[in-house]
């Protein structure tokens, strides 16, 4: 296997860690008292299952979920007689949401985070970022161990091993910078009122 292919493999591992950090919290809703940040998105209700004629059915398969305002999700069931079941399912989903049934529409207002919840969300984002940094560093260590083993085994000359070490360090530094940038942007987004 060529040096470039090995470095690319470790780069993919580091990139996966950065992507995981970037996606933390996107389209997810956590209970108001847990760490995490609320972002109004139809994806917030992906885990909700509605008792649809005795069968637990994903909400998206039986209703239209939309976000008409920044702090409001609306749900319009395709069958009007399922409106109460939809409201009950959202309420019982453990998301800390209080749906309001109005005619043929379920409104789910989202409350802004309190100052304490924002601080907890920032702490959660920092913990997740540290996990990603650790994964990037571990990927670097694994790559360096493999490069050293290849050099000692004669599969890679000293110049190639030095070049691989340098490239791996550059990839790790780039990955760490990306994690830091994503974390800073997430913190700024969370703390914005």
Image (tube, grey):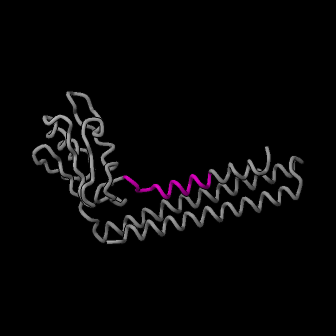
Q: Is residue 16 magenta?
A: yes
Residue toward you, 8 or 143: 8
Q: Residue furthest top?
A: 54
Residue toward you, 62 or 86: 62
Give the image location of residue 123, x and y in percent: 42, 66
- Side (left or right) of 83 relative to 177: left
- Side (left or right) of 142 relative to 41: right
User: Residue 90 is drawn in which quadrant?
Assistant: top left
Give the image location of residue 2, x and y in percent: 80, 47
Residue under the image location 81 percent in, 50 percent down: 149
Quarter of the image where the C terminus is located: bottom left
Residue under the image location 40 percent in, 56 percent down: 25
Compared to residue 176, the image places residue 148 above or below, namely above
Compared to residue 188, the image places residue 58 above or below, namely above
Q: Residue furthest left?
A: 103
- The span picked out in magenta is 13-27
Give the image location of residue 108, x and y in percent: 21, 52
Quarter of the image where the N terminus is located: top right
């Amino acid at each position: 296997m060529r040096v470039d292919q090995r470095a690319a493999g470790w780069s993919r591992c580091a990139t996966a860690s950065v992507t995981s950090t970037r996606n933390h919290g996107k389209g997810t809703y956590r209970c108001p008292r847990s760490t995490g940040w609320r972002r109004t998105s139809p994806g917030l209700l992906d885990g909700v299952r509605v008792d649809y004629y005795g069968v637990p059915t994903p909400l998206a398969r039986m209703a239209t979920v939309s976000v008409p305002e920044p702090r409001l999700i609306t749900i319009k069931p395709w069958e009007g007689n399922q409106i109460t079941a939809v409201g009950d399912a959202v309420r019982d989903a453990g998301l800390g949401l209080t749906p309001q049934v109005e005619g043929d529409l379920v409104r789910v207002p989202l409350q802004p985070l309190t100052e304490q919840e924002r601080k907890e969300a920032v702490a959660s984002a920092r913990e997740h970022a540290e996990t990603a940094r650790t994964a990037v560093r571990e990927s670097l260590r694994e790559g360096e161990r493999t490069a050293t083993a290849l050099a000692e085994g004669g599969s890679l000359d000293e110049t190639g091993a030095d070049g691989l070490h340098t490239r791996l360090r550059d990839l790790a530094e780039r990955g760490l910078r990306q994690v830091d940038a994503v974390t800073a942007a997430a913190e700024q987004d969370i703390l914005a009122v």
